[in-house]
Image (cartoon, rainbow, N blue to C red):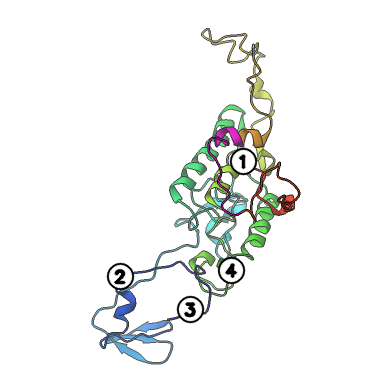
Amino acid sequence: LIPTWGVGCRRLTPGINYLESLHKDNVKVVYGEIESITEKGCKCDDGNEYPVDVLICATGFDTSFRPRFPLIGPGNVNLQDAWAKEPKSYLGVAAPGFPNYFIFLGPNCPIGNGPVLSAIETQADYMLTLVDRWQTENIHSMMPKADAVEDFLAHTDAFMKKTIWQEDCRSWYKNNSASARVSALWPGSTLHYIEMMRETRYEDWDFKYDGNRFAFMGNGYSQTELDPTCDLGYYIRTVDDGPYSSRDKRRRVITKSGSKTAPIANPVQWAPENSGPSTRLAQPEKTQGAARL
């Protein structure tokens, strides 16, 4: 019962009195796979038949991300077949080769390493930014570019190699395999995912339009000019309160950065910017540090 891999490689499933029950006289622990069901019980891959009164199927659930119904894309490609061996998604919300198709809790989003509800809300907001553009810009179809998906997967795989999830254990994180890539988890924290999804990277999407892509510009009048309740001079301001052009500044405003005093829990990890030479710490390479979100 003592695993050979590290804690967390497989999902922890503690249960009250579970381990204690395995030491009872009327309990026999059998390892391996069930090959067939017989009249008296079941036959396992060790060649033995085990008689049982009740057979409880505890087979878990399907975590392959394959849709439960045929989903046909361009070229008559079925997503069930495309994801039969390895699911590939763009940030857990879309599939390459399947336009106008969005998914909640798709491959490589924070399902098992963060609060799922927060991930769902984040994905809904992300999808609506694309739906809003689809409704207003004569867009016929949109889907993530294949090279963007491959880059995302390459980054994810490189991240997972440094985690406990990539150890040699069979896990639903790896589609019930010991050697497959980790497809059920996000390469980072939930906050990392929320901030990554806050701004849509339109350059990663392939848009197809109904006719001229600028036809939505209309007759030269804006919706503001057609709204009699609007201030037509709204752009004239007495103070510079326009949108922040810096991504870092937007992050600081949204997250209320500076509203709390940060205790120095570990001086090896953090040092104030104005600290002297005796306490100033070497900063990590930007490419190895926190995401610039």
- Is residue 239 positioned above or below 252 on the image? above
Magenta-colored span: 252-266
Disc 3 packing (10 Å; few <14; some 14–19; many ≥20): few
In front of the other: 250 or 131: 250
Secondary structure found at label 4: helix
Secondary structure found at label 1: strand
Q: Horizontally, is 2 left or right of 217 in the view?
A: left
Label 3, on which residue? 3
Q: Is residue 209 visible?
A: no
Disc 2 packing (10 Å; few <14; some 14–19; many ≥20): few
Tell me, yes or no, whether the highlighted magenta stretch contains residue 259. yes
Place of residue 135 in the rendered image (x, y in percent of width and height, measured from the top left):
55, 30
Label 1, on which residue? 142
- Is residue 169 positioned above or below 237 on the image? below
- Res. 16 mark: 2
Q: Earlier in the sequence, mark 1 or mark 4?
A: 1
Dot 4 and dot 3 residues touching (CB under 8 Å): no
Name the residue type under label 4.
Gln
